[in-house]
Every structure is written in C-alpha cells, then in structure tokens.
Image (spheres, coloured by chain):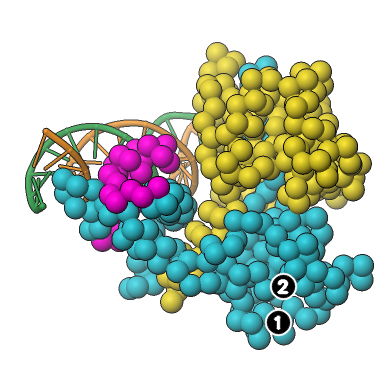
Chain colours: A cyan, B yellow, C green, D orange
DNA sequence: ATTTGTGAACGCATTCACAGCT
DNA sequence: AGCTGTGAATGCGTTCACAAAT
C-alpha cells in the first residue's frame, strides 16, 4: 500500500516536486516564512490549483487563509524526494559527458553522492575527474556497486554498450538509472529509468523551427 | 495554417518522430525494404496504433496490407524533423558540459552543425574543444549568431546567467533553445525551448526509490 | 490474410470552481 | 477577506476496434 501509493503518483507530479523543492530552498534563503500556492505557481509557471493538488496528495501541509510554511514544506518535499539523506551514484562511461556529469556542481549537498566512474579505456582508468572522482575499470563495477550500496547509475557510454551496462547495473543492485545513450534499454519491474536523449531534444526542436518555415 | 498545423502537433508526437527516424535509419542499414506499424512500435516499445496515428497526421505514407517503405518513410520523417539540411547551433558555456555537448558524437551527419562555443573565462576563450570547435568570448555572441545564421542555441552556463543568455540568444535571432541550466527561462511566443534538468531527473528517480522503501 | 487510416472510447492530467477553514 | 483542499469539468493524448484497401 505504501508501495501502491507511490506507484500511483504520476511521474509528472514527481518532476514538479523537484521544481517546488528548488523554489522552496530559494524562498527560505530569501527569508520568506510562508508562501501561497499562487506564489509557488508563479515561480514555477504553473497553475496554483496544480500546486495544491500535488501537495495535498501527500497531506494537508497548508493552512487555509495563510498558505504553506516554507521551511516545513521544504523539509516535507525533500523527504518525499528522498534527498534528506544522500543516495550513492555511479557513472558508467568516463568520456566527456561522464566526466561533466561527475563534476556537475548541482550535486554538492543535493542528496546525491558520486561514488565513482567506470570505463574500459586504459587512458582514463586510474585517473580522476577534475573534481576528484576516481575512474575505475568497468570490471570493478559489480564489486564497487555492491560494496558501496549504490542505488543509482548514470549511463554515459556509446549506444551499443548501453543495454549491457544497464543489465549489469541492475544485476548489481542499482534501483534507478539515468540513461544518456540514444537507446531505450528495458528494465525489470521495480527499476526506474529516465532517458535523457539529446538528439530527441534537438530534433523535436528542429521540427518546430521547420514549421515556422 | 502551415504555422497552425505545426502548432497543433503535440510535442510528444515530435519526440516520437525522432525515435522513428532512428529505427528507420537502423532498418535501412539492415537492408529492410518495408516495415509495418507493429514493427516500428516493437522497436520503440509503443502501441502500433500510436505509430499509425502519428504518421497519418502527415499523410498516408503506408500501403494497406504491406506497411511502410523504409527508405521513403525515412526521407519523409527526416524532412518533417528538418534534419534533411543542417541547422547551425551554438553552445553558450564552455565548461565541462558545454565541451561535452560540442563533441557529442551523435551530431555528425545528423542535421546539426556546431558553429562555436562561447564563454567569458579567459582560460577557455581562444581555445578549441577536443573535437576542434572554437571557443569565442561571449561578447561575440550576437555578431557570430547573426553572421552564421544560427538557429539553435544550447545553454550550459550556471543558473544565474541562464536567463540573460537566453535573452541574448533570442534577441540575436535564435529560434530554438535547449537549456541545461536548472532554471526555466521564459521565451517569447514563437521561440521553442527544451529544458534538460539533471536534478529533476535524479530527484524524480529518487522519489520512486524512496517509495520502494 | 494482412495492414493501414481513423472515428469512438478510454484514461489521465490539468484546470475550474467552490465549500470549508483560519 | 484570504487561501487551502477537492469534486466536477475539461482537455488531451493514447488505445481500441473496424472499415477500407491491397
């Protein structure tokens, strides 16, 4: 039931929760004590009813006539998103993209900890990213994922290798995957995957430009 | 009307067109002459009716009882997506991510040409990416975008600078933007924007992992 | 027999509108 | 008066199911 509830939450809602968390952090930093659904909605460019419906799904955090207490709501949303504690993450593929992901500044203190990168190429194995994250040989993937209790894997390898990498990550115990390779690997039930496909972004953009002749 | 038609096409459809193009290219490389909606659907993990509906929106490309001619359909879809000719692209922000995007292998021959990167930091201005793309000073943005007739800008700068960069790109004549900064810049009507937000991907993933306790 | 193209049905997410609380 | 929480309404995208075509 805990599990069923979670399954019921549309992905669109969880993505908005992430936006809400961001503006709540900003509001708190700005010293705001309370905020209305309209206040949040304006900052996220959404409908206020959308914000209320999203939040009320998880409980009545607001106070009628007043709004939401910023600091309390920030804690609630952070907990919902599971970023109140750090999730360990590995990155497979230590090319340009993998290294850029490893050193992405948004990770610091954001609930995710990059444990390691993996690659098969001798010229990168044994080195470290600029930010100091070690690059291991891909052979060590299973061992390190298990030892470090890694929960999330990011896949930044060429398309042909992606499916195999995903399989190995899942077999090692990873529960969530962010895939940057231009393929759609399938994953067993209970494993979450998000595909980030640069070509789809560009081509769908290009479609609209073409439409404007 | 041309314009209205284009506006009517849901973004979800245009994203799927990009997937169709990819499998059509693969099918053609594999020497397949025809393919059914089911064949495409299986490769994209979609419903066959979805594929037919998407394609029939643009015309009756299929033959009843037979399917679609692979090579013809590939040409049609490529043209719809506007990747039959090269669109010029600039990248603003030549940090790890910007450089990784510039050298992304998927671009070669895919209908997009990276013209230049821009940055404000002395240590990168005047250098080139590994793939040979020049890094200019951000002051030159407007001049080069106009001179080179750039249509798409990718934004890979820190969050505080993103809104300003988007404004300058649009003012210079760019029509489409892929934004990697964790903010949602707003753009005038007629300008398309796609936000790629790593933190949203990770946090929405994290939500599901948390739900599985 | 096979497969497209499409109107109808369905399901889901967003928005409206208002009752209920402060 | 102000704002939340939510049932009802709307809008939209997906899937079904079948007529039309080969």
- Decide whether residue A185 is among the magenta residues: no
Name the residue rendered at 42%, 52% in the picture.
A29
Name the residue rendered at 33%, 40% in the picture.
A39
Q: Secondary structure at mark 1?
A: helix
Name the residue rendered at 87%, 45% in the picture.
B129
Within 10 Å of disc 2 (Cα), the crowding (few <14, some 14-19, many 20+) is: many
Quadrant in which the N terminus of chain B is drawn: top right
Any mark on residue A195, and which? none
Task: State the separation of the CA atoms marked 2 and 1.
Answer: 8 Å
Range shown magenta: A30-59
Tag in front: 2 or 1: 2
* Residue at mark 1: chain: A
Q: Position of residue A72 (x, y in %)?
A: 31, 61
Q: Position of residue B116 (x, y in %)?
A: 82, 33
Circles 2 and 1, Cβ within 8 Å, touching? The answer is yes
Whether residue B25 is visible here, answered yes or no, is no
Name the residue rendered at 19%, 53% in the picture.
A63
Q: Position of residue B201 (x, y in %)?
A: 56, 56
Quadrant in which the C terminus of chain B is drawn: bottom left
Q: In the figure, B21 relative to C1: above or below?
A: above
Q: In the image, are marks 2 and 1 on the same chain?
A: yes
* Residue at mark 2: chain: A
- Decide whether residue A34 is among the magenta residues: yes
Any mark on residue A144, and which? 1
**Closer to us: A60 or B111:** A60
Q: In the figure, A37 relative to C7: above or below?
A: below
Any mark on residue A116, and which? 2
């Amino acid at each position: 039931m805990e599990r069923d509830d979670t399954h019921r939450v549309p992905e669109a809602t969880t993505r908005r929760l992430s936006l809400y968390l961001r503006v709540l952090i900003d509001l708190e930093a700005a010293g705001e004590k309370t905020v209305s659904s309209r206040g949040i909605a304006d900052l996220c460019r959404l409908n206020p009813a959308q914000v209320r419906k999203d939040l009320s799904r998880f409980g009545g955090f607001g106070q009628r006539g007043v709004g939401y207490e910023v600091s309390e709501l920030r804690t609630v949303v952070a907990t919902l998103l599971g970023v109140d504690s750090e999730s360990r993450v590995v990155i497979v593929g230590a090319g340009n993209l993998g290294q850029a992901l490893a050193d992405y500044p948004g990770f610091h203190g954001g609930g995710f900890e990059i444990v390691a990168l993996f690659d098969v190429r001798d010229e990168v194995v044994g080195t470290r990213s600029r930010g100091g994250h070690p690059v291991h040989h891909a052979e060590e993937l299973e061992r390190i994922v298990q030892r470090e209790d890694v929960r999330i894997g990011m896949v930044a390898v060429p398309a042909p290798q992606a499916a195999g990498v995903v399989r190995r990550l899942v077999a090692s115990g990873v529960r969530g995957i962010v895939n940057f390779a231009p393929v759609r690997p399938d994953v067993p039930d209970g494993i979450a995957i998000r595909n980030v496909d640069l070509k789809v972004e560009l081509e769908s953009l290009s479609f609209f430009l073409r439409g404007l002749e």
